């Protein structure tokens, strides 16, 4: 679809596109959500993480105007969701966490059907479907029956379906579940492409590692309550999760000197080395501190060939498990 594939002209901004204010949801005796307050900055890839039953689907369905909160409000741009559900449904694309039953349709017919449901004029539908199939790399499956697609392909087709009306916001419920590692990488690339097109994307998962490498921001929910939210580095830092830094040298001759130097740096801990000119350490500072550490190594003539901070995904997973275990025991 021409207007969708073109890069966004919107300038990056930290303005919130979604504001969730004191939202609670009860199903009879179950408190699925309890007083959630959260703002989603425009243009982010926002991960919503929590164990099974935490309330992720409930929250996404409220944002998609498919479910009404018991109390509280959700604003998407200037619109309050419960008052303007049809406007919200034009702004939002929702991909549920189940495939559903596919009628006897090809991939192209399936997307055309949903384009029709969204009121897209008949003469525009074929072009939109072609562009969407290309975007999700299913052009070669255009005439294939949906039932015959692999799980990863069905996920991408569902994503295309959520994009059919070119929404600004995408809500993806467990999109990576059941995908093999290659399909997950493809999904990650696709999500990044969509972010590059100016979309704001919320993705839920109960596996933090699936999201830590893909998201700019995360919120952890547990038993319907928000535990913590913010950009990935800040959340890692706040939860005491150190980042890793890997430093590779030209040779092993000065590895001891570099380690001795690093031992005097306050934000570096747990240094380990191996025979392959590699030093690994935990790092608890910010990007500016990292810059100073690298500058000092270079100024002192240490033969650094690579200096690679890594987001503390592994450590974050550990922290996440601790939080959710604590919550379950409470
Ligand atoms: N229609 C419903 N009627 C009654 N209880 C419900 C309903 N939908 C969800 N719940 C309950 O609300 C809580 C939150 O469910 P929700 O599906 O939002 O969690 P989730 O984080 O998406 O979980 P999962 O990862 O397992 O999909 C759970 O205790 C669930 O059993």
Image: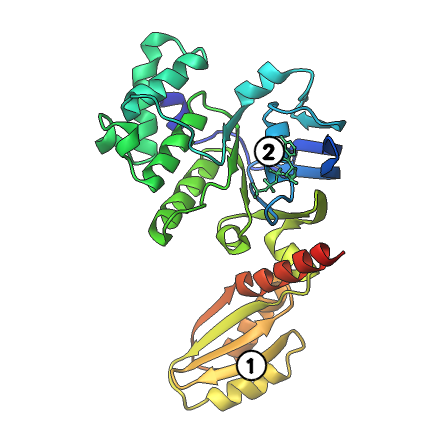
The image quadrant where one finds the N terminus is top left
Residue 311 in view of the camera: no
Q: Position of residue 273 (x, y in %)?
A: 48, 84
Q: Position of residue 86 (x, y in %)?
A: 58, 14
Q: Which residue is mark 2?
A: 60
Q: Which residue is mark 1?
A: 271
Query: How far, Cα to Cα, is label 1 from label 2?
Result: 42 Å
Query: Vertically, is 257 above or below 244?
Result: below
Query: Vertically, is 222 above or below 23?
Result: below
Q: Is mark 2 within 8 Å of ligand 1?
A: yes
Query: Vertically, is 78 above or below 300?
Result: above
Which residue is drawn at the image coordinates 36% and 46% (left, top)? 186
Q: Residue furthest front?
A: 29
Instruction: Classify the position of ligand 1 by quadrant: top left, top right, bottom left or bottom right.
Output: top right
Task: Please state if 127 lies on the left or on the right of 325 as rendered.
Answer: left
The image quadrant where one finds the C terminus is bottom right
Report helix, strand or loop for mark 2: helix
* Crowd band around label 1 with a 10 angstrom C-alpha radius: few (<14), some (14–19), many (20+): some
Which residue is drawn at the image coordinates 71% and 33% (left, top)? 20
Task: Please state if 54 lies on the left or on the right of 70 as rendered.
Answer: left
Q: Position of residue 137 (x, y in %)?
A: 30, 36
Report helix, strand or loop for mark 1: strand
Q: Position of residue 164 (x, y in %)?
A: 42, 22
What numbered label is drawn on residue 18?
none
* Crowd band around label 2 with a 10 angstrom C-alpha radius: few (<14), some (14–19), many (20+): many
Query: Vertically, is 31 above or below 289?
Result: above
Q: Is mark 1 within 8 Å of ligand 1?
A: no
Say which of 142 and 291 sits in front: 142
Q: Are marks 1 and 2 in contact (CB under 8 Å)?
A: no
Residue 194 in view of the camera: yes
Which residue is drawn at the image coordinates 55% and 42% (left, top)? 204
Which residue is drawn at the image coordinates 67% and 59% (left, top)? 325
């Amino acid at each position: 679809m021409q207007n969708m594939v073109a890069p966004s002209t919107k300038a990056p901004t930290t303005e919130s596109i979604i504001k969730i204010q004191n939202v609670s949801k009860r199903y009879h005796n179950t408190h699925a959500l309890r007083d959630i307050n959260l703002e989603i900055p425009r243009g982010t890839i926002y991960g919503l993480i929590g164990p099974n039953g935490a309330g992720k689907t409930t929250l996404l369905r409220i944002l998609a105007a498919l479910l009404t909160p018991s109390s509280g409000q959700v604003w998407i741009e200037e619109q309050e969701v419960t008052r303007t559900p049809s406007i919200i449904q034009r702004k939002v694309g929702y991909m549920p966490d189940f495939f559903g039953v596919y009628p006897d349709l090809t991939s192209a017919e399936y997307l055309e059907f949903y384009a029709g449901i969204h009121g897209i004029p008949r003469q525009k539908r074929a072009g939109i479907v072609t562009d969407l199939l290309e975007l999700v790399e299913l052009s070669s499956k255009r005439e294939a029956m949906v039932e015959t697609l692999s799980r990863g392909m069905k996920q991408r087709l569902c994503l295309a379906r959520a994009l059919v009306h070119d929404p600004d916001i995408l809500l993806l419920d467990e999109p990576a579940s059941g995908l093999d590692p290659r399909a997950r990488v493809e999904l990650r690339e696709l999500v990044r492409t969509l972010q590059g097109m100016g979309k704001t994307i919320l993705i839920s998962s109960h596996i933090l590692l699936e999201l830590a490498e893909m998201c700019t921001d995360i919120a952890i929910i547990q038993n319907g309550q928000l535990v913590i939210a913010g950009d990935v580095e800040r959340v890692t830092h706040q939860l005491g999760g150190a980042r890793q830094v890997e430093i590779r040298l030209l040779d092993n001759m000065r590895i001891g000197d570099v380690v001795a130097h690093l031992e005097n740096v306050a934000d570096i801990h747990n240094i380990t080395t191996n025979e392959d000119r590699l030093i690994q350490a935990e790092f608890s500072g910010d990007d500016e501190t990292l810059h100073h550490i690298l500058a000092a190594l270079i100024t002192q003539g240490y033969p650094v060939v690579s200096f690679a901070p890594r987001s503390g995904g592994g450590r974050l997973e550990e922290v996440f498990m601790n939080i959710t275990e604590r919550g379950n025991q409470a």
